[in-house]
Amino acid sequence: MSDQIKFIVDNLNKEPFKKSYNLITFDSLEPMQLLQVLNDVLAEIDPKQVVDIREEMPEQTAKRMLSLLGILKYKPPGNATDMSTFRQGLVIGSKPVIYPVLHWLLQRTNELKKRAYLARFLIKLEVPSEFLQDETVADTNKQYEELMEAFKTLHKECEQLKTSGFSTAEIRRDISAMEEEKDQLIKRVERLKKRVETVQNHQRMLKIARQLRVEKEREEFLAQQKQEQKNQLFHAVQRLQRVQNQLKSMRHAAADAKPESLMKRLEEEIKFNSYMVTEKFPKELENKKKELHFLQKVVSEPAMGHSDLLELESKINEINTQINQLIEKKMLRNEPIEGKLSLYRQQASIISRKKEAKAEELQETKEKLASLEREVSVKTNQAREFDGTEVLKGDERTEELLKQRLENIQHQLQTIEEKKGISGYSYTQEELERVSALKSEVDEMKGRTLDDMSEMVRKLNSLVSEKKSALAPVIKELRQLRQKCQELTQECDEKKSQYDSCAAGLESNRSKLEQEVRGLREECLQEESKYHYTNCMIKNLEVQLHRAIDEMKAYVSSDQQEKRKAIREQYTKNIAEQENLGKKLREKQKAVRESHGPNMKQVKMWRDFEQLMECKKQCFLKQQNQTSIGQVIQEGGEDRLIL
């Protein structure tokens, strides 16, 4: 709580409030004074809240403050039951209620100013639905909503312009340059007008030139529209051609395709897609995940300094040396089992790489085929536009003939089989031949694969022995180079440390110079402000001096009119008038004081007379209302009642 009060007091003592509170004086404020402080803070956020709460009813004050806090989206602590406590505390100026509100307002004054400004224009007035039945009210409400949306758009553009980085100096330079260009253009137009005025019928020629310019603009617009329509037509023709080609290829595939070829093609596509889904894409996904995990780890790590980089470099060098030593030991040891395993690993890696290469090659081939089909469609369109005929493919020229011959041969073969009593023999024979051909191909492939693998193993063994003999002198040379690398690394570290110390010294000198420059700039700004203040004072004194000189001239002048214009004469005249007025008022006061006593007596007598007459009036009225129980006799100015 003390930190909260300290924050409130510190902010109230600053601009724009300029209070002079301390913790004791602020805490000892009366509830009315505390409410006035809260109202001052709200008035700084929304200028419409400038009110003296002593001249306002407590209920109105609480209602006004609660409505503004609701607009500013202040949420009181607690639940719904505490809301009534909050309202009551706001009415009576309770410190536990006012202090959190002040702390929240002073933390975000600039943000709340903007929110209060926008609330004046963006809080929508809810109009009842029965009033919206009127056309005038509905149109006005619609116009009101459109203006609100326009205000939102303009406010966003204004905020973007404020944050866009445009400087007023650049804008002013651009405006001045544009004004200069405008002046030059105006001058050129005037010169051209002067030249044209000497020509006969220049008005008619200007009118014709204006019409020509309008027609040229219209011609350009029509040409642009024509080009757009041509492009749209070309794209539509291309789409139609692609669809027709797809339809033709599908019909062709459905007409001359056998179930075996379709199944074979589907199996190949399934194998390719399953390889892409089960092997290639998961590997790529795993690599991307590893890369993402590594990048996230790098991002989550704190910023590394120069010492951390040096430590990492030393660790990397140590690990590299260990790896090189292990490789040398492995190459020096001739382990046949490990060599065989390495051969199998190499073969597996080679096969996997070949598989990946073939898959990529197949994908590229498919893309190339699609591009060629698009190119063929474009060429076909060009040929059709050239002579209006369809270009036939080679297979399309003999398709009908081959189909007809095939049907004839099959029909003859079926009739012969029926005559011989061996129906379906040709189909069975074809299947047997096809199965035997497939079996022989598989056997041949197996034998060829075993021979290839044995040949590959022999070549790899010879290649490994050659590489070992070739790498022996290289390893010796590598050791010398590693030692030299370590020496150079040590020298590099020493030079780097020297560089770091020198850079640190230069950085400290630079910071000192920047501090000196900053101090000199501040001193220069102070001197400039003093200079401007002095100039303003001099100008004020010059104005006062001129006024004094004019006053002396008017006062010394022999002209009575000039004398009357003098300020001294005017003040003298006003003083004389006020003295005369005071003298008359004093005389009037004296007369009032003298006649006050007799006048008060006369007033008292008139009041007594009025009461007496009122009493007689009441008695007369009662006499008329009552029944006659006696006789009233008036003698000698007296009334007597005789029963």
Image (cartoon, helix red, strand yellow):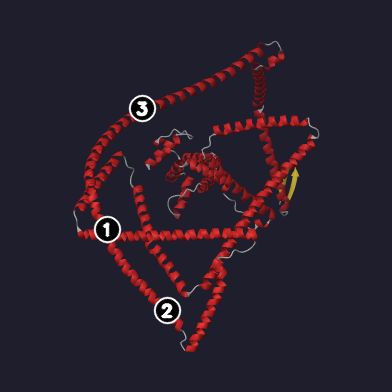
SS label for mark 1: helix
Q: Nearer the viewer, residue 298 or 550?
A: 298
Task: Using the rendered view, name the quadrant where residue 304 is placed.
Answer: top left
The earlier-in-sequence mark between 3 and 1 is 1
Residue 495 visible in image:
yes
Task: Measure the alpha-carbon separation of dots 2 and 3.
Answer: 96 Å
The earlier-in-sequence mark between 2 and 3 is 2
- Tag 2 and tag 3, C-beta contact below 8 Å: no
The amino acid beneath tag 3 is Lys
x and y percent of residue 599 in the render? 67, 30
Task: Measure the alpha-carbon separation of dots 3 and 1.
Answer: 69 Å
SS label for mark 2: helix
Circle number at residue 431: 2
Q: Residues within 10 Å of mark 1 (few under 14, many from 20)?
A: some
Residue 636 visible in image:
no
Q: Nearer the viewer, mark 3 or mark 1?
A: 1
The earlier-in-sequence mark between 2 and 1 is 2
x and y percent of residue 640 in the render? 72, 46
SS label for mark 3: helix
Circle number at residue 460: 1
Task: Using the rendered view, name the quadrant where residue 524 is placed.
Answer: top left
Q: Nearer the viewer, residue 335 or 616?
A: 335
Say which residue label 3 marks. 512
Q: Nearer the viewer, mark 2 or mark 3?
A: 2
Q: On the rendered image, what quadrant is the N terminus found in?
A: top left
The amino acid beneath tag 1 is Leu
x and y percent of residue 605 in the render? 68, 35
